[in-house]
Image (cartoon, rainbow, N blue to C red):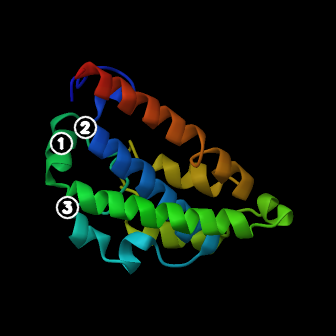
């Protein structure tokens, strides 16, 4: 974590950023849009990856991010990313134009809260209202695209620090 004290997405680790991006995608696709079981739980990725948390990780800061990143089995994390991408690709290929305007159902919000996948920490809990205030199109734009771009750019900056 070469930029641990910086402001911005690059103050994380690459492993954390990968975790964070794909946990969000899994949660949004399965809990909010499809209303089914997340890949993370369906395929027992908590144990495979060795993660001490099930959240998106927004509650972690500085050395907590470093310590968390060091616990992850990176090969299993990549396996998880592939499984999430496959499920997202399937969703996107099956969406109808009319689906894009569909608002997130109130019961999906409750399922999200009860799942414990978003921490109650002030750095994370705001996402519940943010996501649940979007329609499907809004969720595709953020977090599926802009969010990934921001964290990928930050990860490249971290990687380039070690060249």
Instruction: Answer yes or no: is residue 125 visible.
Output: yes
- Crowd tier of the residue under label 2, counting other residues whose Cα lies within 10 Å: few below 14, some 14–19, many 20 or above: some
Q: Which residue is mark 1?
A: 64
Instruction: Write the residue at 22% across / 61% down.
Output: 51
Query: Which image quadrant: the N terminus?
Result: top left
* Residue that protrudes farthest toward the right in the picture: 98
- Crowd tier of the residue under label 1, counting other residues whose Cα lies within 10 Å: few below 14, some 14–19, many 20 or above: few
Instruction: Answer yes or no: is residue 117 visible.
Output: no
Q: Earlier in the sequence, mark 3 or mark 1?
A: 3
Depicted 154 relative to depicted 71: above or below:
above
Report x, y in % for residue 133: 66, 53
**Picture quarter containing residue 2?**
top left
Report x, y in % for residue 139: 64, 52
Q: Which mark is residue 52?
A: 3
**Alpha-carbon span between mark 2 and mark 1:** 5 Å
**Picture quarter containing residue 87?**
bottom right
Q: Which mark is residue 61?
A: 2
Q: Which structural element holds mark 1?
A: helix
Left-right relation of 35 to 53: right
Instruction: Write the residue at 36% across / 32% down.
Output: 155
Instruction: Write the residue at 14% across / 48% down.
Output: 70
Report x, y in % for residue 129: 57, 52
């Amino acid at each position: 974590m070469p930029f641990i004290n910086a402001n911005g997405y690059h103050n994380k680790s690459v492993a954390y950023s990968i975790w964070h991006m794909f946990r969000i995608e899994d949660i949004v696709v399965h809990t909010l849009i499809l209303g089914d079981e997340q890949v993370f739980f369906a395929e027992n990725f908590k144990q495979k990856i060795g993660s001490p948390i099930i959240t998106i990780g927004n509650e972690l800061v500085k050395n907590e991010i470093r310590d968390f990143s060091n616990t992850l089995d990176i090969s299993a994390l990549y396996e998880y990313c592939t499984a999430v991408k496959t499920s997202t690709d399937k969703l996107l290929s099956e969406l109808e134009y009319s689906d894009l305007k569909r608002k997130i159902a109130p019961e999906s919000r409750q399922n999200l809260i009860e799942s414990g996948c978003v921490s109650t920490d002030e750095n994370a809990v705001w996402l519940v209202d943010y996501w649940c205030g979007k329609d499907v199109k809004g969720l595709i734009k953020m977090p599926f695209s802009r969010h990934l771009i921001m964290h990928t750019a930050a990860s490249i900056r971290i990687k380039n620090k070690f060249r």
